[in-house]
Amino acid sequence: MDKISSSERIAIYIDGSNFYFSIKNTFNCKIDLEKFCKKLTGNGGIVKINYYIAPIEQFSNLKMYAEQQSFFEILRKIDKLKIIFGRLEKRKRDGNVYYVEKASDINLALDLVLDAQKDTYDKSFLISNDGDFSGAVSSAISFGKKVVYVVVGNKKSISHHLKKVATSTININKDFILDVKLEKNIGTKKLNI
């Protein structure tokens, strides 16, 4: 894990959908996001945590909508965390309906770069395995910022584009997750992702 100066201003940018499925598919558990961020930064000087996600529409799936709304309420209780909403667009293929997340990625990329330009942070952590962010990472670094690529998943999940351009890379492993993992029967008072 990178050493973090006590005076270093840290921003965390989380691709919510990518992060959720990476945790679920790799570790098959739910985590306490606040603990995760604190462990990731060594309890460093977090100035902001941005969580990018598209909300589920109430009419599309009432159960999933209710679960996501409960999740958002828990997120809102985390100090310095802001939820930035994208949208879900309905699509049809071969008579089947599916949804595509829109705007979340571009919102994250813009914030990463504009916050670097505005000197909001010294070091940022990008939690996503989406290689499309490599251009934004390079731009943030061009403003003299450090950008740490946080890999959640197996070797197939790693974005070699992000790894190549980021200042450094942290691989989240089972030992890391054990410290932030929630017990199975914990209620909604804790953050379940």
Image: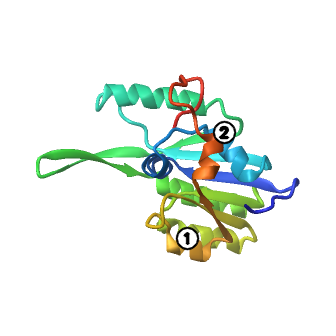
- Judging depth in this view, the residue of 174 and 166 nearest the camera is 174
Q: CA distance from mark 1 to mark 2?
A: 24 Å
73 or 44: nearer the eye?
Answer: 44
* Residue found 35% across the figure and 26% down from its top: 63
Q: Is residue 101 above or below residue 31?
A: below
Amino acid type, label 1: Leu
Q: Which x, y percent locates residue 86?
A: 45, 46
Vertically, is 21 above or below 106? above
Residue matched to label 2:
34
SS for callout 1? helix
- Residue 145 lies in what quarter of the image? bottom right
Mark number displayed over residue 162: 1
Give the residue at the far right of this rendering: 7
Image spot of residue 55 (x, y percent): 43, 38
Q: Is residue 65 left or right of residue 59?
A: right
Q: Residue furthest left?
A: 95
